[in-house]
Amino acid sequence: MRLFSRCLAVVSVSLPMVLISGCSSEPGSGTSSEDGLLVEGQFPVVYVKRSTDSLGNPTDGIRTNAGGDLYFREIASASASELNVTRVYTQGAGDVSDPEVAYDGSTVIFSMRGPNDSTWNIWEYDIASRTLSRIIQDDAVANAGDDVDPAYLPDGRIVFSSNRQQTSLALMEAENKEGFQYLDEYERERVIVLHRMNADGTDIEQISFNQSHDRNPTVLSTGEIMYSRWDHVGGRNHFPVFTMNPDGTNTFVFYGAFSPGNSFLHPRETEDGFVVSDLMPLSGTNEGGGLYEIDVRNFSENNEVAPNYAGTRAQGQLEISPNSIPLGRGISQYGRFTTPYPLWDGTKRILVSWTPFIEGQETNVLTGEVAMTEGTPAYGMYMYDPNKTTMRPLALPTPGVAITDAIPVLPRPVPNVISDKTADPVLVAENKAILNVKSVYDTDGQNLMGSAMLVGSENIPQLDGSPDLNVMKDPALTAASERPGRFVRITRAVPSPPGLDRESIGESMFEMQEIVGYAPLEPDGSFKLEVPADTPLGITVLDEKGRSIQVHTNWIHVRPGETRTCNGCHSPRRGSALNGAGIAGNHINTLLATEAESGESMAETATRVDSTRLDIKPDLSFVDFWTDPAVRAADADLSIDYSGVANPPVNGVINYPEHIQPIWDANCVVCHNDPDSNNATSAGLDLRNTTTGRGRLQSYDELVIGDPLMDENGLPIIRQMDEDSLELEVVREAPMVSASNSRGGSRASFLTEVLFGEELRASGDLSEITTDHTGFLNPSELRLVTEWIDLGIQYLNTPYETGAGDDGFYAVSEIRSSISGLSSELYESDVHPVIMTWCSRCHQPFGGSGVSGPLNGGFEFTKFVLTGSIEGDFNITASMIHDISDPDNTALLARASSDAIAPNPLHPQREVANPLYPDDASSDPDDPNFVSTDPTHPSYIAPTIWVPIWDTSSAEYQAVRDWISAGL
């Protein structure tokens, strides 16, 4: 494209900084043509210049680098002079981001951090008077957190993102916990969530509650707040678009939960009701991606169109970039876009920042080859016309500087004002809310509760391709035992404090969670419950044995006193509810057939008649509430409690060492006590309570870490740990238990299949298990193991040390810093060189260090696969330490020092010169020093002998032993 070529040619040209000395029109007025549209470019614009080091990933909530400022141009033109609005405060050593213009075009609100500030603060610039003022006047209040992404609300207040988390802190204190600002689920920085305040900085209130960042709030014409939400639940890890009311109620996913692309960032409404957003990967592109127009009025997802849609559009999202930009991290030869702002002038033009492709280089950690990649971007400011696919430069970048967040200084219509909801005062006093779901089987065509999740004889009756709720809810047609979903489990997220390491949480894609409780699922799949307010909640639908069928795919929060009503789990947001007309309120053949009101789900009817059904229970308990005895006998009662375990969880907290290991100790270790796969009794499964090199129990690592996966050549498959990592890892088979995503959990774990004796959804082959394990665990133990798996197979679900809170108060000083384990520093300095010298010849598939180079002919496949990467080799070496309290009997030392004579473990040995072989040995039978070469001859002495890899007195053995002992 020639236009892009011209841009590339001048992209390094810097414009001189000239202060505005005169104005051609009143600030914010623009210039109109006869048809009422703005003459192109004839309006003021504000924008940000920042260091390119400030450009991060969508997952970066706060980034600060010196050199950021807010700029103003009287005309959106490359020839217009620019005014550095904030230099008087930043002195060139501060940072600025996220400007937004008032609805009357008179002021600009933005976030700034000065060179002497400890936090980001929200500031306002008055265009007419050219004055700056900080919104929050009190220093202590202003510095309580980093405040970014501000936007004006139509009632005069301000919405913004902040890591001050003040309501979350207050709730911790109400639970007798010293408050801390919790960290995100990925980058381990303090989470920024939405807050609002008055125009003068008073009355600050937290209005969103997420485990990761809520970013880029703007206000729709409806008055709702639209924002990008980091939706990280298990394997789901992306930024869809959400909406909420200004008081934080009615939070719902708006678009992007099941659509192509990962991160919808900087979404903004267009004047014709569409949304323009840039769409990018989760990392690696400096917040740059393609430009997309989304028809949010008629599509809830890219392929989910509203009923009766009469338009011609086939999909919800349409790329409007002049050339297609990769959705992934592949090189984009046409550059990338960021921070688009659609003009409301009838032209569909977009103010946007764009960078051409800048070539960079990186070394492939797998091959060692230097490859081309995208280098540091050069974002400039452009006026883009998607109808003409033309882009006019307004400000070209200088090296090391990015120009972003261009906003027209123009009046625009004030959105609708949504008043705060009237909250139930009783629920407010208890910090509770009502969560009302019409039917969990209503999943917007995603089949999230459909055939893909069912096992065995489970069945969901269908009508026109959707679940037939009339059949499922009618006791005359369906018994309780024939309904797949029987219970719902409510969990709440446990905030992750600073200093807590991943080893404490465990080999989990989830963060720590607590079980709030259970409730029976009504026959039509509905439930209506009182739940904790202002905290991230999880919902899981369970079968009759308490095992997860499906996990809700994002954290839910409800405000105190709110009643949140959902049609279903990811139900149609642009169409009618499944549990709607003709179904809701029609409870035939039930005891409440005459009590039901029009449009009521069974849960709504039941809780209106009996308010105790709003209560969440500690155990799984079902008593038939519906079946009319005149139709048939009532369904059997069902209850699963903790009466069969000696140490039940307290307050819904399940910790593996305290609650799961005792089950193995009582029932399993009599057989499963040896990691050697040649042991027919243990089958290589060691469930003992010894401590491994990772500082965790041996049984935990055995269950959650799979064996190495081999390729067609019998070699282990090795990959980068992640796209941004220079470390390698061995790809592994599915472990005994799995909790990677919403479709995982107990029914997708082979351990569950073995314990229940049922083929469910795991990848293992149950027919290979020769011993029937059903009945080994009692119902309470099965429930506890199932809960542990469904929550996410965490090692710990509390951040506090054992014994914390004994005095009734949980102090920050009682937060666990890490679990004890082996030192990675000692490993790097003392052990890894020994391992590479003595073990790589058999345990590393490729010669040399790393994974490049010739194939290693001596490689032998075992669980112990080295890569040459220190971090990766540390992890695999630590897995060979099954009990740090007994170093000599760990697999690593016992095998390396073994003579391979039973009962010592089998292990290859090394050939050395026989010390008994005479130096002056002769082959002459008449020589006194004759030594025969015939092994059967009395004078035979072998010239070499085979000895263990390490003698127990060797320096190598002692170095490894000292490293293990230091882990105690």
Image (cartoon, grey):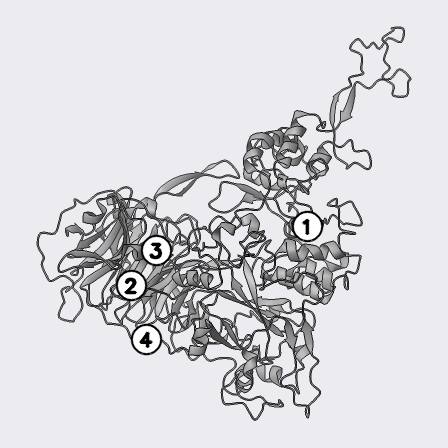
Identify the residue under disc 3: 144
From what the image shows, is residue 853 above or below residue 689? above
Query: In terms of depth relative to the viewer, which is nearer, 730 or 949?
Result: 949
Q: Residues within 10 Å of mark 1 (few under 14, many from 20)?
A: many
Circle 3 Cα neighbour tier, 10 Å, few/some/many (<14 / 14–19 / ≥20): some
- Upstream in the sequence, badge 4 or badge 1? 4
Instruction: From the viewer's side, name the closer residue of 709 and 827.
Output: 827
Q: Secondary structure at mark 2?
A: strand
Q: Position of residue 275 (x, y in %)?
A: 34, 66
User: How packed is label 2: few (under 14 Cα within 10 Å), some, or many (20 or more)?
Assistant: many
**Amino acid type of the residue tagged 1 in the rendering:** Ser
Q: Is residue 315 visible?
A: no
Name the N-terminal-most of marks 1 and 3. 3
Dot 3 and dot 2 residues touching (CB under 8 Å): no
Residue 922, numbered circle: none
Q: What residue type is disc 3 on?
A: Ala
CA–CA distance between discs 4 and 2?
16 Å
**What x and y, as percent, mark residue 714?**
67, 42
Query: Which residue appears at 48% of the width and 36% of the height?
Result: 369
- Residue bearing mark 4: 418
Q: Is residue 791 left or right of residue 343?
A: right
C-alpha gap between disc 3 and disc 2: 19 Å
Secondary structure of residue under mark 1:
helix
Q: Nearer the viewer, mark 3 or mark 2?
A: 3
Classify mark 4: helix, strand or loop.
loop
- Residue at image mark 2: 151
Q: Residue at x 41, y 73 (%)?
A: 250
What's the CA distance linking mark 1 and mark 2?
51 Å
Q: Earlier in the sequence, mark 3 or mark 2?
A: 3
Asked if residue 953 lies left or right of residue 340, the reply is right
